[in-house]
Image (cartoon, rainbow, N blue to C red):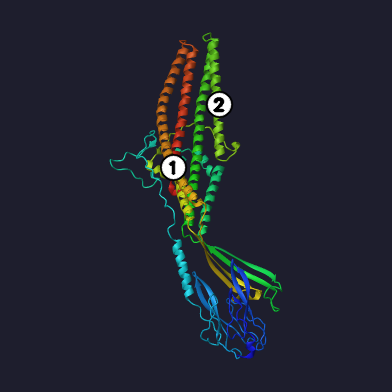
C-alpha cells in the first residue's frame, strides 16, 4: 500500500440513506456524501453531494465531486483523477420502481484496488466486493421489466376497480295493480273494454291511447291555451323547482368526478441560507442557494368496493326524482289554472242568468206598478217585486266579486300583476271532452309523484352500498414529478428531473359502532322510502277512483237538475198567466221565479264542477307525462 494512502483509513461512505458503511481495507480516497433533502409531493427524494478529502494525488482536493445523484449524468470537468461511475440498477418494490445505484472506480496508479466497486447496491444491501468492472465509464441498460410491472399493476388495479360494488342491487318494490278501475265514470270517460276470460290487456307503452303533451288542448278553448302557455316561462315557483333540479343534476357530476384522479401543478421559488455552523459543515459548504421547482402531482382512489359507483347511482336516482317532482309541480300548476279558468267561466254563466233575471224582474216590477195604478194590484205586490229585483242585483254583484278573485289567481299563476291580465266574460258553453283513462297498470308509469317516490327508493338502496363500503380499506395511489434546480438555465433538463410514486392503504379499526349504525340507518331509510312509495301508489289509484266517481255522480245530478230547471220554468209560466188573469197573488209568481233562479244557478254550478272534476281526473292520471321523459 502506498504511504500516501495509508494515512487515510477513513470510510469511503459516511452515511448512505441511513446506513453506516464500515471501514474496510484499502480505501485511500474516501468519498463523503452529504445529504441534501428535497421535498416533493409529500415524499422525500434525497439528493447527494460528494467531496473528496485532501490528498496529494488530487490537484483539486476538496472540490465537489458530483452535485446530484438521481438521474444526472456525471460529466468530466477539470482535474477529476478519481471519477465515480454510477450505474442504475432498478429494483421493484410493491409494484413501484425505486432506482438503486452501483459505483466503481476506474484504474488509477494511486489506488491498489482500482476497478473494484466501492458500493454494490445502494438500498439496504451490504456493500461487498465483486469482480472488477471495466474501467470505461458506462451506464447499465435500464431493465425493461419495470415497464411490464407497471403495466401489470395498472391492469390489476383496473380489474379490481371494475369489480361488483358492495351493497344490494336495486329491485323496485312490488305492487300489484287492479285489472280495471271500480268506477266507470261518466259517458265522457273512455274506459278500455273488459279483457277476454283468462287474458289481461297489456299496453305497448305507458302512453298508448292516453293524453300526450299539452293535455289542456283537449278542451278546445283558445283562451285557455293562451293562458296555459304562460306558466312555463313565467311561474316563479316552477322556476325555483327547476333550479333545484339543475342542482341535483350537478350533484351527479360531483359524484362522477371521484372516478378520476386529481391532478395539480405549480412552480415554486425560494432563496435559502443555511447556518455555517451546522453539523458536518465544511469551509467549502454552500450556505446561500436558490431552489427553483416546477412540480406536478396527482392522486387517485380506485373504486375497489363500489363506493363511488353507488354514490353516482344514488345521485342519478335523486336527479330523476327531482325531475319527476318538477313534472308533478308543472302538472299541478297547469291543472290549477284550468280549474280556476273553468270556475271563472262558470261564474260568467251565472252572471248571464242573473242579468237575464234582473231584466225580467224589472219588467215584472213595471207591470205590477201599472196594475197598482189600475187598481188591480196592491202596494204589497209592488214592494215584493221591488225586493225580488234588488235581491237578484245583489247576487249579481257577489258573482262578479268571485270572478275577480279567480282572475287574480290566474294572474298569480302566470306571474303577472293583476292589472296586467284581463279575461273577457264568456259563459261556459263548452262540451265536456272525452278523457281516456287507460289501464291501472299504466298509472304507475304515468304519475310523476309515483315516479319520484320510486326513484327515492332507488337512491336509498344505493346509499346502503355507500355505507357498507366504509367497512373496507381506503386505498390511494399518488405520484408526482417535476424539475428542481438552483439555476433557471438548468431547470428544464434531464438531470434536474425528480419523481415519486406511492400507495397508501388505511382501515378503520374502531369507531364505537358508527359504521354499523350508519348502515342500519341507511337500511331503515330504504324501508321508509319503500313504504312511502307503496302509500303513494295506493293514494294514486284511490284518487283516480274518486274523480271517476265524481264525474259519474255529477253527470247523474246534472241530468236530474236539468229536469228541475225545466219544471221550474214551466211553473213560472203558469204562475205568470194566473197572476195576469187575476187568479192568484204576486207571491206565487215570486216563489216560482225564485225556484227557477235557484235551479238555474245550481245547474250552472254543476257544469263548472264537472269541468273541474275532469281536470282533476286528468291530473290524477298524470296529464300527458310518462316515465320515458325522465333524464337517463
Whether residue 540 is visible = yes
Is 588 on the left or on the right of 33, as rendered? left
Mark 2 lies on a secondary structure that is helix
Mark 1 lies on a secondary structure that is helix
Q: Compared to 524, does 469 lie above or below?
A: below
Q: Earlier in the sequence, mark 2 or mark 1?
A: 2
Q: Compare residues 70 and 205 and report the one nearer the observer.
A: 70
Residue drawn at 51 percent across, 35 percent down: 340
Q: Position of residue 331 (x, y in %)?
A: 48, 41
Circle nearer the viewer, 2 or 1: 1
Q: Compare residues 553 and 631 and report the one nearer the observer.
A: 631
Q: Dot 1 corresponds to which residue?
A: 531
Is 620 on the left or on the right of 54, as rendered? left
Q: Quadrant of residue 35?
A: bottom right
Q: Which mark is residue 398?
A: 2
Q: Quadrant of residue 616?
A: top left
**Residues at marks 2 and 1, CA–CA distance in whole angstroms:** 47 Å
Q: Compared to 297, does 624 lie above or below?
A: above
Q: Position of residue 41 (x, y in %)?
A: 59, 66
Q: Position of residue 219 (x, y in %)?
A: 45, 38
Residue drawn at 33 percent across, 39 percent down: 193
Q: Compare residues 630 and 7 and report the one nearer the observer.
A: 7
Amino acid at each position: 500500500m502506498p504511504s500516501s494512502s495509508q494515512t487515510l483509513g477513513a470510510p469511503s461512505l459516511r452515511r448512505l440513506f441511513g446506513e453506516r458503511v464500515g471501514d474496510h481495507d484499502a480505501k485511500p480516497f474516501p468519498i463523503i456524501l452529504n445529504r441534501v433533502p428535497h421535498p416533493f409531493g409529500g415524499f422525500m427524494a434525497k439528493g447527494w453531494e460528494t467531496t473528496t478529502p485532501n490528498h496529494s494525488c488530487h490537484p483539486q482536493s476538496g472540490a465537489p465531486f458530483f452535485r446530484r445523484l438521481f438521474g444526472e449524468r456525471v460529466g468530466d470537468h477539470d482535474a477529476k483523477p478519481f471519477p465515480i461511475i454510477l450505474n442504475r440498477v432498478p429494483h421493484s418494490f410493491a409494484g413501484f420502481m425505486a432506482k438503486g445505484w452501483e459505483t466503481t472506480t476506474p484504474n488509477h496508479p494511486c489506488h491498489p484496488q482500482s476497478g473494484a466497486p466501492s458500493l454494490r447496491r445502494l438500498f439496504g444491501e451490504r456493500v461487498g466486493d465483486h469482480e472488477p468492472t471495466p474501467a470505461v465509464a458506462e451506464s447499465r441498460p435500464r431493465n425493461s421489466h419495470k415497464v411490464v410491472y407497471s403495466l401489470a399493476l395498472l391492469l390489476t388495479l383496473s380489474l379490481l376497480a371494475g369489480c361488483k360494488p358492495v351493497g344490494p342491487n336495486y329491485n323496485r318494490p312490488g305492487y300489484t295493480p287492479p285489472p280495471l278501475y271500480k268506477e266507470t265514470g261518466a259517458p265522457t270517460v273512455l274506459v278500455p273494454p273488459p279483457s277476454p276470460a283468462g287474458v289481461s290487456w297489456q299496453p305497448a307503452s305507458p302512453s298508448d291511447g292516453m293524453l300526450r303533451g299539452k293535455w289542456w288542448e283537449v278542451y278546445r278553448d283558445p283562451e285557455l291555451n293562451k293562458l296555459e302557455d304562460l306558466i312555463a316561462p313565467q311561474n316563479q315557483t316552477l322556476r325555483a323547482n327547476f333550479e333545484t333540479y339543475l342542482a341535483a343534476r350537478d350533484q351527479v357530476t360531483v359524484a362522477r368526478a371521484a372516478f378520476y384522479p386529481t391532478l395539480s401543478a405549480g412552480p415554486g421559488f425560494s432563496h435559502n441560507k443555511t447556518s455555517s455552523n451546522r453539523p458536518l459543515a465544511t469551509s467549502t459548504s454552500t450556505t446561500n442557494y436558490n431552489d427553483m421547482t416546477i412540480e406536478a402531482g396527482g392522486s387517485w382512489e380506485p373504486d375497489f368496493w363500489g363506493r363511488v359507483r353507488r354514490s353516482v347511482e344514488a345521485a342519478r336516482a335523486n336527479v330523476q326524482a327531482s325531475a319527476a317532482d318538477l313534472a308533478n309541480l308543472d302538472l299541478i300548476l297547469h291543472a290549477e289554472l284550468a280549474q280556476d279558468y273553468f270556475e271563472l267561466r262558470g261564474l260568467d254563466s251565472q252572471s248571464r242568468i242573473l242579468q237575464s233575471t234582473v231584466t225580467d224582474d224589472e219588467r215584472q216590477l213595471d207591470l205590477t206598478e201599472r196594475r197598482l195604478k189600475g187598481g188591480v194590484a196592491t202596494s204589497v205586490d209592488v214592494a215584493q217585486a221591488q225586493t225580488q229585483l234588488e235581491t237578484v242585483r245583489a247576487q249579481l254583484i257577489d258573482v262578479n266579486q268571485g270572478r275577480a278573485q279567480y282572475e287574480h289567481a290566474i294572474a298569480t299563476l302566470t306571474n303577472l300583476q293583476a292589472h296586467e291580465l284581463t279575461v273577457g266574460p264568456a259563459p261556459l258553453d263548452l262540451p265536456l271532452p272525452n278523457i281516456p283513462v287507460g289501464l291501472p297498470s299504466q298509472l304507475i308509469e304515468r304519475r310523476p309523484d309515483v315516479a319520484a317516490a320510486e326513484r327515492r327508493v332507488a337512491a336509498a338502496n344505493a346509499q346502503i352500498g355507500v355505507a357498507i363500503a366504509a367497512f373496507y380499506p381506503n386505498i390511494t395511489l399518488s405520484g408526482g414529478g417535476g424539475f428542481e434546480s438552483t439555476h433557471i438555465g438548468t431547470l428544464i433538463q434531464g438531470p434536474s428531473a425528480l419523481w415519486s410514486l406511492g400507495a397508501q392503504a388505511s382501515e378503520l379499526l374502531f369507531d364505537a359502532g358508527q359504521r354499523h349504525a350508519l348502515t342500519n340507518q341507511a337500511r331503515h331509510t330504504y324501508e321508509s322510502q319503500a313504504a312511502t312509495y307503496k302509500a303513494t301508489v295506493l293514494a294514486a289509484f284511490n284518487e283516480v277512483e274518486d274523480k271517476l266517481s265524481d264525474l259519474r255522480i255529477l253527470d247523474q245530478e246534472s241530468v236530474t237538475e236539468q229536469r228541475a230547471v225545466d219544471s221550474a220554468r214551466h211553473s213560472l209560466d203558469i204562475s205568470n198567466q194566473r197572476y195576469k188573469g187575476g187568479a192568484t197573488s204576486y207571491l206565487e209568481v215570486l216563489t216560482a221565479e225564485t225556484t227557477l233562479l235557484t235551479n238555474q244557478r245550481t245547474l250552472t254550478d254543476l257544469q263548472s264542477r264537472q269541468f273541474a272534476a275532469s281536470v282533476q281526473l286528468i291530473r290524477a292520471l298524470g296529464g300527458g307525462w310518462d316515465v320515458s321523459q325522465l333524464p337517463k
